[in-house]
Image (cartoon, helix red, strand yellow):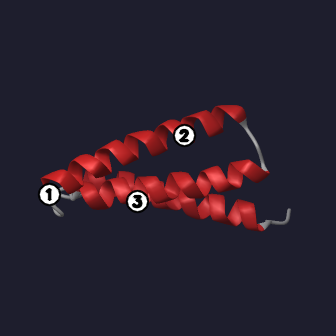
Amino acid sequence: MSFDLAEIVGLFGSGLMVIAYAYSNLTKVLNFTLFNLLNLIGSLLLIYSLMVHFNVASMALEIIWVVIALFGLAKALRKGKAS
């Protein structure tokens, strides 16, 4: 099995989202800006990967994930950098 750039980028995006999830469960005070930024970047990287290796269910999930992360990021930035 060989990995192309899209697969590597997608794996990196998945890793960022897993880090965000772990962070949200392990920290005592959650920085919502960081949490949503990690999810946003991870999702965008996965969307890039899915544009090369398309899967409709995964693409729909990632688009929704981007929208949620953008709303969360906007809310966190309105409240302050370290909400």
Element type at marker 2? Answer: helix
Residue appearing at x 70%, y 33% in the figure = 56
The C terminus lies in quadrant? bottom left
The residue where tag 1 is placed is 29
The residue under label 2 is: 63
Relative horizontal placement of residue 39, taking residue 80 as reference (left or right): right
Task: State the image quarter where residue 63 is shown.
Answer: top right
Residue drawn where x is 55% and y is 42% of the image: 62
Tell me the amino acid under the disc marked 1: Val
Residue that appears at 48% across and 59% down: 41
The residue at the far right in this view is 1
Which sits in the foreground, 11 or 69? 69
The tag on residue 38 is: 3
Q: Do the residues labelled 2 and 3 touch (CB within 8 Å)?
A: no
Disc 2 versus disc 1: distance between alpha carbons?
A: 28 Å
Badge 2 or badge 3: first in the primary sequence: 3
Decide: few, some or many residues near mark 2? Use Cα within 10 Å; few <14, some 14-19, many ≥20. some
Q: Where is residue 29 in the image (x, y as percent from the top left)?
A: 14, 57
- Mark 2 touches mark 1? (CB < 8 Å): no
Q: Position of residue 67 (x, y in %)?
A: 44, 40
Q: Which amino acid does label 3 sit on?
A: Leu
In front here: 27 or 65? 65
Earlier-in-chain disc, 3 versus 1: 1
